[in-house]
Image (cartoon, rainbow, N blue to C red):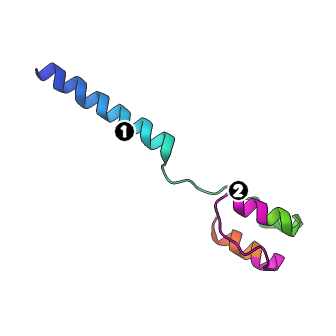
Amino acid sequence: MTEFLSYLVVFVSVGALVYWFMMGGEEVAVLPSSDDLKKLKKAELVELAKANNIFVDPKSTKTVLIKELETHR
């Protein structure tokens, strides 16, 4: 019975790790450098924000969009 519990604990632990890797863990946004952000067009900045799950107002100016993206580094 003790051997069964050992296997059960290992199985549950591995399952929890697999779940954590597949579903989550904290994702960190990888954004281009500040200079590279300035080279992008406004539509590209909006798409970059959307791809990184960062909410921005598409009607904002390019400067505001860059500031919003910078705060999520």
Q: Is residue 36 visible?
A: no
What residue span does the magenta drawing correspond to?
Answer: 46-64
Residues 58 and 22: in front is 58
Judge left or right: residue 45 versus residue 41.
left
Q: Which residue is mark 2?
A: 51
Residue 34 point in image, percent of width and height: 78, 67
Please, what is the three-letter code of the amino acid marked with disc 2? Ala
Q: Which mark is residue 16?
A: 1
- Of the residues under marks 2 and 1, which one precedes in the sequence? 1
Relative vertical location of residue 54 with respect to residue 27 in this rendering, above or below: below
Please, what is the three-letter code of the amino acid marked with disc 1? Ala
Instruction: Quadrant for the N terminus, please.
Output: top left
The residue that appears at 87% across and 64% down in the rendered structure is 40
Residues 5 and 32: in front is 5
Judge left or right: residue 10 versus residue 65.
left
Is residue 53 a member of the stretch shown in magenta?
Answer: yes
Is residue 60 a member of the stretch shown in magenta?
Answer: yes
Residue 11 point in image, percent of width and height: 30, 28
